[in-house]
Amino acid sequence: MFLDFPKSCKLRLFLPDSLLENETTLMLKTLKIGAIARIFCIFRINDILFYDNSGKTKDKKIIEDILNHLSIAPYLRKYFPMSPLLKFSGILNPLQAPNHIGVKHEDVTYKEGIIKKTIFTSNSIKYDIDIGMKKSEIINISTNCGNPLSEGEIVIVRINNNGSKIFKLKGNNLFWKFHFSFLLESLSSFIEKNKKNDTFIIGTTRYGEKINNRQNIMEIKTALDTGKKVELLFGPLKGSFKKYLIKGSDNVDIWINFVPDQGTVTVKLEEAILSTLSILNTLQ
């Protein structure tokens, strides 16, 4: 299933926190954010940032609760309180991300678990970890291996014939599950402060240059091949994205229309994300 685990990811997404404003009911909002979460996992997106484009959105808590719920392995959700905003989460398609179903690769199994209990002895620490099996894993770690982990902390457990140990993915560009956060400043300000030589920023807009232009494809592919962190910006549902960014637009390396010659009046955000990532996936 996962032949080359862990898979790499070179993309970071920026999305408006108003992405649910056209959906009128909690069920419709749930379905939309659930579909977008599936897209994150399909294309191995582990870093998503939501920006405030209006200051009026009432859906931030819905996005936060549903994505937090979906990111956790299903067998661990019993350890977390259920929000009333998760009323329709049961109708969503399963994500089937690596952390949800576990990964078996080269005679080694990786499972997400939660620390149920920490047991201190004279020279070691034992962790009782629920990994979704009938029996919990007991992992014994020397006391000189750094700060002890807390009960309720989620970890990755590596299991083979020699036993089990807590495993950490090395590097920020490896996909296990998606992570998201909300910007505490404007997108323009964040881009200005964090623009680095090793980042390549793509703004998506129907008024950008067509992706089927060979020069545009080569420019993006070069950024990916040279190890740059590619940041993908999706605009608000209403208004001009370039006008919204103001000064931040100067830091965008290229503006691209990923759906040239579209056959509909508009392309919905979830459709734009899927179309864009499908193209970029072939260039990685």
Image (cartoon, grey):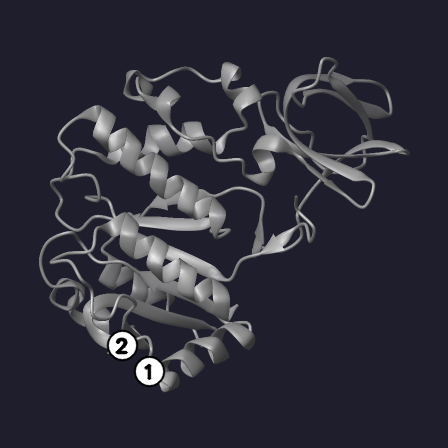
Whole-number angstrom distance, CA of label 2 to CA of label 1? 6 Å
Judging from the image, what secondary structure is the residue with disc 2 in?
strand
Residue 16 visible (yes or no): yes
Q: Position of residue 13 (x, y in %)?
A: 37, 55
Please tell me which residue lies in front, 73 or 198.
73
Give the image quarter of residue 81. top left
Amino acid type at mark 2 = Lys
Q: Is residue 242 above or below residue 84?
A: below
Q: Check disc 2 and report the residue beneath it.
A: 210
In terms of secondary structure, where does tag 1 sit? Answer: loop
Return the residue at label 1.
213
Residue closest to the eye, 54 or 266: 266
Crowding near pointer 1: few (<14 within 10 Å), some, many (20+)? few
Q: Are marks 2 and 1 in contact (CB under 8 Å)?
A: yes
Q: Residue flagged by tag 1: what amino acid is it? A: Asn
Q: Quadrant of residue 100?
A: top right
The answer to whether residue 192 of the structure is visible from this angle is no
- Crowdedness near tag 2: few (<14), some (14–19) or many (≥20) residues, C-alpha within 10 Å: some
